[in-house]
Image (spheres, rainbow, N blue to C red):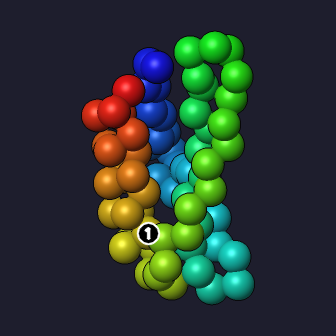
Amino acid sequence: MNASIRIPGSNPDHHLWNNHGTWWCHFTVHLPDFRKQRVRRSTGTASLTEARQIRDFLLTVLAAHA
């Protein structure tokens, strides 16, 4: 699996959305057999700053395991 993580500077909240006060992170993992897996995880926080940090951590862990 190759990791290609893109967070455009024009949208620092890329991969994040607010669902009734809690920020969620979502991204798509492209698997070696050409399938895709959509991943959605709650950040468990109402703070956008914390949500960005959690998103960055999740994507870093994903890239490390790629």
Is 36 left, or right, of 57 in this rendering?
A: right
Element under disc 1: helix
Residue 16 in sight here? no
Q: Position of residue 23 (x, y in %)?
A: 56, 73
Q: Quadrant of the C terminus?
A: top left
Identify the residue at horizontal 44%, vertical 19% (top origin): 2
Residue placed most toward the observer, 37 or 51: 37
Q: Is residue 65 above or below residue 55?
A: above
Q: Is residue 21 above or below residue 66?
A: below
Identify the residue at horizontal 67%, vertical 15% (top origin): 34
Residue placed most toward the observer, 6 or 30: 30
Is 8 left, or right, of 31 in this rendering?
A: left
Q: Amino acid at mark 1?
A: Ala
Residue placed furthest toward the front: 33
Q: Position of residue 15 (x, y in %)?
A: 57, 51
Residue 55 in sight here? yes
The answer to which quarter of the image holds residue 20 is bottom right
Q: Residues within 10 Å of mark 1 (few under 14, many from 20)?
A: many
Residue placed furthest toward the top: 33
Q: Is residue 19 above or below residue 53?
A: below
Identify the residue at horizontal 64%, vertical 73% (top origin): 18
Q: Position of residue 10 (x, y in %)?
A: 51, 45
* Residue ID for mark 1: 51
Is 52 left, or right, of 64 in this rendering?
A: right
Identify the residue at horizontal 63%, vertical 64% (top origin): 17
